Image (spheres, grey):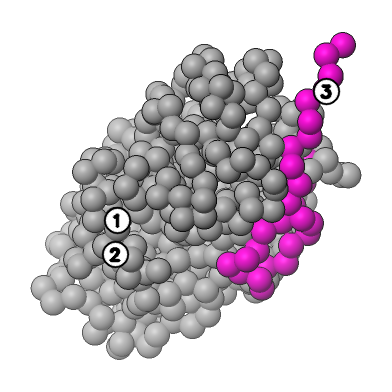
Amino acid sequence: MADSIRIDRRGFLRTVGAAGTVAAAGGLAAACSPGLQSPSGGGGGDVIKIGYVSPETGPLAPFGEADQFVINAMNAHFKQNPIKVGDRPFPVEILKRDSQSDANRAADVAGDLILNNGVHLMLVSSTPDTSNPVSDQCEANGLPCVATVTPWQPWFFGRGGQPDTKFEWTYNFFWGLEDVEKVYGDMWDQVGTNKIAGALWPNDPDGLAWGDPATGFAPEQAKRGYTILDPGTYPNGTQDFSSQIARFRDGAAEILLGVPIPPDFTTFWRQASQQGYHPKIATIGKALLFPSSVEALGPIGVNLGTEVWWSPSHPFQSSLTGQSAKALADAYTQETKKQWTQPIGFAHALFEVAVAAFGAVSSIDDRAGIAAAIAGMKLNTVVGPLDWTSGPVPNVAKTPLVGGQWRPGTATPFDLVIVSNTQHPDIPVGGAVEPLPAPAPPA
């Protein structure tokens, strides 16, 4: 599969546009590509400065909801366990910035962290709208950067990456389109449908990647006998989805597919219910990852499906704190009184990678060494094993993906139940795929 991805994704940029154990320190330094040198300057001083950019506000705010919890936990951890670089322990300062769900803002705050705050390493999370511009700033300024919660194709190809080359400073860990295609296809196979799927593709890097007619969902799902009904992209923030709903309803699309931002799916799904569009199964990326998004829908949220990248039942633990996925999720609920949410694990894992990278160098200002450490890193984390040496393309480490559906909860309004683990049977299921409830008869 990896070899076919290397070839098939070559044309992606033309569509999107340019929008655990760690190896020994000596081996990691040797992994540095020829000619890679640390730029002059840098943080210096007696404190490790780590930049962290994610969306705290705006339409992507649910992605960043748990970040402050993780940062608070990391501040407490580093107070008791300073990062050791060479033979010397260093205190850590985490500089958090809000991208406000805006790519230009993300680039601006990243530039400020690099040029005016002297960070030694950048961490960035949550969709290409934030991860890509921050990564681009770091690549341009020669600063090591680790991104996550961004599928690797929009991050790599969307920034001009090529399968036979690599970025010098920027790295990503997450799953890819090939993974979500398999997860959704497996879920569709378990519900009797006419195999016609209506697609909600926003005009953003995710929507353009997922909807690419050559490299997105359509050709892969055609191999399973499915047809994608594509009405074209729409702008984020759309308030009227009547044309898409009519197309899906008239085209008898018994499957709903898409990757909208949370508020847009809430608008679409309410209008679909009102206008008589009732698919048998829905698998929606991005918008349905969070409890708050489903709670906003009420009863019409039952059995909506989405990808699951992390949950309390994932059988992994932190290389920093030793916490299991369940212990980390429970700590979040105890601290915030909120239901667990998928980005918790990945925000935590960013700091696992950061600590491992600093532990492989002898100076906090060794940017080239930190970048080389990430490039050669193999690390078991709370989101699973990460391995930057095995592709599928340079600068990318893959994480596991399963599928879930939202069911009425007991202690909470909805629980995300894992229902598809074909690709990763080590992650246990909690139920079987169920069709969406039939619409209530008119009063």
Callout 1–callout 2 Cβ contact below 8 Å = yes
Q: Is residue 213 visible?
A: yes
Magenta segment includes 421: yes
Circle 1 packing at 10 Å, graded few (<14), some (14-19), many (20+), is some
Which of pointers 2 and 3 lies earlier in the amino acid sequence? 2
Magenta segment includes 24: no
Q: Residue furthest left?
A: 35
Q: Position of residue 245 (x, y in %)?
A: 55, 21
- Residue 77 vs 189, above or below: the answer is below
For discs 2 and 3, the disc positioned in front in the rendered view? 3
Local secondary structure at mark 2: helix
Local secondary structure at mark 3: loop
Q: In which quarter of the image is residue 249?
A: top right
Residues 231 and 316: in front is 231
- Residue 64 vs 439, above or below: the answer is below
Range drawn in magenta: 414-443
Circle 2 packing at 10 Å, graded few (<14), some (14-19), many (20+), is some
Residues 263 and 42: in front is 263
Tell me the amino acid under the disc marked 2: Arg
Tell me the amino acid under the disc marked 3: Ala
Give the distance between the C-alpha atoms of the residues marked 3 and 1, in whole angstroms. 43 Å
Which of pointers 3 and 1 lies earlier in the amino acid sequence? 1
Q: What residue does disc 1 label?
A: 9
Residues 14 and 8: in front is 8
Q: What residue does disc 2 label?
A: 6
Residue at coordinates 49% horizontally, 28% vertically from top-left? 58
Circle 3 packing at 10 Å, graded few (<14), some (14-19), many (20+), is few
Q: In which quarter of the image is the C terminus?
A: top right
Local secondary structure at mark 1: helix
Q: What residue does disc 3 label?
A: 440
